[in-house]
Image (cartoon, grey):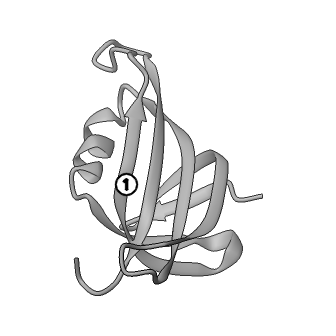
Amino acid sequence: MVDQVILNDVPLHVTDFVSETVKDSEGKEIRKISFNFKVTHSEYHDITTLLYQMVFDIKIPQSNEEFRAEIFNYATSVTNLYEENAVGDFSLVLLEVNGQE
């Protein structure tokens, strides 16, 4: 069971990890991964800044996979992460991309 995904050298402890193969707009098979992770008040700025990059070097240590991917969808809980001790739930779906997107 995968419990860590690394986005641009930033390790995330993840839950509900799903990996599948889908077809892109040209019919080519690409990887699609989705997972959830927690973000604390103290991590909020760094994580959202990371996500604004939109395209990532992905590493999945437990399956020895590395590839580039972009955000297909993401969502957050309504938790106000500016409050001390707050923890939010983030959900992320990434699609594999080719080259230096």
| Horizontal side of residue 13 vs 97, given as left or right | right
Image label count: 1
Q: Residue at x 27, y 41 (%)?
A: 48
- Between residue 72 and residue 86, name the one nearer to us: 72
Location of residue 99 with respect to 6 vertically, above or below: below
Q: Where is residue 46, by image quadrant? A: top left
- Between residue 79 and residue 97, name the one nearer to us: 97
Q: Three-letter amino acid code at disc 1?
A: Phe
Check disc 1 and report the residue beneath it. Answer: 72
Location of residue 3 with respect to 100 vertically, above or below: above
Q: Residue at x 46, y 83 (%)?
A: 28
Location of the N terminus (image quadrant): bottom right
Q: Residue at x 63, y 72 (%)?
A: 61
- Between residue 11 and residue 79, name the one nearer to us: 79
Helix, strand or loop for disc 1: strand
Residue 40 coordinates in the image, percent (x, y)? 43, 29
Location of the C terminus (image quadrant): bottom left
Location of residue 14 with respect to 87 vertically, above or below: below
| Horizontal side of residue 72 vs 59, given as left or right | left
Location of residue 91 with respect to 100 vertically, above or below: above
Q: Residue furthest bottom?
A: 99
Residue 27 coordinates in the image, percent (x, y)? 45, 80
Q: Residue furthest right?
A: 1
Residue 22 coordinates in the image, percent (x, y)? 54, 69
